[in-house]
Amino acid sequence: MAKIKVATTSLAGCFGCHMSFLDLDERLVTLAEVAEFDRSPITDIEHCGPCDIGLIEGGVCNSENVHVLREFRKNCKILVAVGACAINGGLPALRNPISLEACLLEAYRDGIGVENAQIPNDPELPLLLDKVHPIHEIVKIDYFLPGCPPSADVFWTFLTDLLEGREPALPYELVHYD
Ligand code: SF4
């Protein structure tokens, strides 16, 4: 039987959701019996190909995030917002009440300890958006896994339900934010 293909990526996030996924520990071996990884930190594939499940950590803060997110939406049958940053912007969205200009000036010109002040202006750098967006504002999302980060048990329950053909359902005790 063909294996399910799973891809993951981190947009504007801290990688904590991915670390929580790795907390599946030995259950990753069980998962690997029925699933193979496309783009992910495990495989280091740059662009995700056709996949069954895409797991997205982090919100959308720049033009590259938009591009990657749209690529995942195009290639993944089921797209999942993983964690608070993907669902509502999370910590990176704390910059939203402040203008982008003020953020850049504080970070690169006026902040304490800044030397050789200059705003980065290399064409290779992705352009910052004026706000950090939750991913459902850019593309359609099929499922949301709450938590900061969602626990390994949340990932396991969700993926097990999907792989066994059930509509995913998270028990109340698994949904928390500490
Ligand atoms: S939801 Fe929490 S753990 Fe996940 S990327 Fe955002 S800050 Fe990090």
Image (spheres, rainbow, N blue to C red):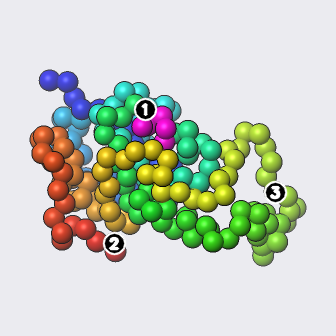
Give amino acid for label 3: Ile
The mark closer to the camera, 3 or 1, is: 1
Going from N to C along the chain, the mark reached first, 3 or 2, is: 3
Which contiguous range is marked in magenta?
A: 69-73
Q: Is residue 145 left or right of residue 117?
A: left
Give amino acid for label 2: Tyr
Give the residue number, with chain letter if any, for mark 1: 74
Q: Quadrant of the C terminus?
A: bottom left
- Residue at x-position 48% and y-position 57%: 134
Q: Which mark is residue 177?
A: 2
Give amino acid for label 1: Lys
Q: Is residue 37 visible?
A: no
Residue nearest the observer in this picture, 123 or 89 = 89
Give the residue number, with chain letter if any, for mark 3: 119
- Residue at x-position 16% and y-position 48%: 167
Q: Indicate the secondary structure of the residue bearing disc 3.
A: loop
Q: Quadrant of the N terminus?
A: top left
From the viewer's perspective, is residue 112 above or below residue 158?
A: below
Query: Residue 126: image x %, image y %?
Result: 67, 44
